[in-house]
Image (cartoon, grey):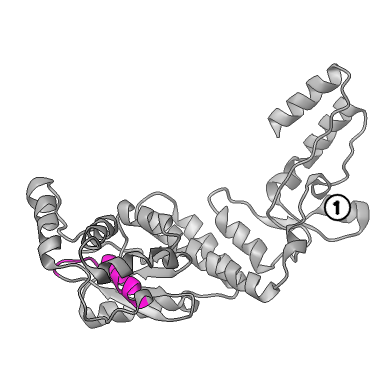
């Protein structure tokens, strides 16, 4: 904004009748203040401490209720004065006036949109809890997310993969993970001697999509064990379990000679949009792989023992 106003000043000094507006997607001005989409915006900007609020300037000028956020509302009197100094008069009567935003008019299924927003709020809550566990943020940010969840009327129980992962962990006594597929199917993965829970989960999902029986091995232990040996005995890793990127690389090698592995590899694109929950915080490597695969990942705020 400061850069734009500086340019606006210099353009008018040169006699060029320039103007100023901004494209601001969130919060959506013509949705209710506590619409799940606007609450999801607050959840996404909890680190900035943004707070949605009714635009008092718009209400006074037009008698209409619109939604804006604290930083825009707080700075508007300063912005308005600068417009008057540069242009002679301000073209705007409110912060909402300045925005170019038709996103609210693009919602054709409010129920689906609300569900997606609520899902995002829960995911943001888990991210905040894990970041707090890592020492990256204060507890205040987590508490704010808890308040937003109450406002959106959601709990962690609304994320189906959470209960499934925790149940699998209780049954196996080790870290576990669960995935919800687009058709609502829930798959789980457990920690074994060779694979971590999320690596096992990925393979289980690919087998499901490919129609491969669950008891069929996509990768021979003879392929996995040398990788584990390399990691522990030569690269100094303490955790012998292969990460998701190593799992996919090993699977791609096996696909050259194994028909089932080849079928599984062909299903990777179907992982996009799936929901996953892990009962432990994952490595940065695993987090990056899930992000690249388009999988929405959450984790319990605890480390594997």
Instruction: Locate residue 166, reporting x and y percent.
Output: 33, 77
Picture residue at 39% right of the left edge, 73% below the top: 179
Query: In percent of the image, x 63 and y 63: which residue is there?
Result: 39
User: Residue 49 in the image: x percent, y percent?
Assistant: 58, 51
Q: Element at badge 1?
A: helix
Residue 132 in sight here: no
Q: Residues within 10 Å of mark 1 (few under 14, many from 20)?
A: many
Q: Which residues are magenta?
A: 193-208
**Residue found at the very far top of the displayed protein:** 14
221 inside magenta stretch: no
Return the residue nearer the eye: 181 or 17. 181
In this rendering, position of residue 41 left or right of residue 24: left
* Percent of width and height locating residue 233: 7, 50
- Residue farthest along the left direction in this orientation: 233
Q: Residue at x 73, y 70 (%)?
A: 108
Provide the major secondary structure of the magenta segment: helix
Whether residue 22 is visible to the viewer of this picture, yes or no, is yes
Q: Which residue is mark 1?
A: 58
Residue 178 percent across, percent down from the top left = 35, 74
Task: For the C terminus, give its image quadrant.
Answer: bottom left
**Left-right relation of 237 to 199:** left
């Amino acid at each position: 904004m400061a850069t734009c106003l500086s340019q606006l000043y210099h353009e008018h000094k040169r006699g060029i009748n320039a103007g100023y507006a901004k494209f601001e997607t969130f919060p959506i001005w013509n949705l209710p203040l506590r619409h799940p989409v606007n609450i999801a915006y607050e959840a996404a900007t909890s680190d900035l401490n943004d707070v949605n609020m009714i635009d008092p300037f718009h209400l006074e000028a037009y008698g209409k209720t619109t939604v804006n956020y604290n930083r825009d509302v707080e700075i508007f009197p300063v912005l308005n004065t600068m417009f008057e100094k540069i242009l002679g008069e301000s073209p705007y009567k409110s912060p909402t006036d300045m925005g170019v935003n038709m996103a609210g008019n693009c919602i054709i299924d409010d129920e689906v949109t609300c569900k997606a927003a609520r899902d995002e709020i829960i995911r943001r809550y888990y991210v905040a809890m894990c970041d707090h566990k890592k020492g990256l943020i204060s507890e205040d940010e987590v508490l704010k997310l808890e308040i937003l969840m109450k406002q959106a009327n959601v709990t962690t129980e609304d994320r189906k993969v959470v209960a499934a992962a925790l149940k699998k962990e209780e049954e196996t006594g080790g870290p576990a993970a669960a995935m919800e597929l687009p058709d609502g199917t829930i798959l789980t993965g457990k920690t074994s001697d060779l694979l971590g829970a999320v690596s096992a989960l990925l393979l289980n999902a690919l087998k499901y999509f490919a129609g491969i029986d669950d008891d069929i091995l996509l990768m021979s232990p003879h392929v996995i064990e040398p990788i584990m040996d390399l990691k522990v005995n030569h690269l100094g890793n303490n955790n012998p379990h292969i990460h998701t990127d190593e799992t996919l690389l090993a699977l791609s090698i096996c696909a050259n000679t194994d028909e089932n592995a080849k079928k599984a590899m062909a299903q990777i694109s179907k992982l996009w949009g799936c929901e996953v929950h892990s009962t432990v915080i994952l490595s940065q490597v695993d987090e990056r792989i899930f992000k690249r695969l388009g999988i929405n990942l959450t984790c319990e705020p605890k480390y594997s023992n």
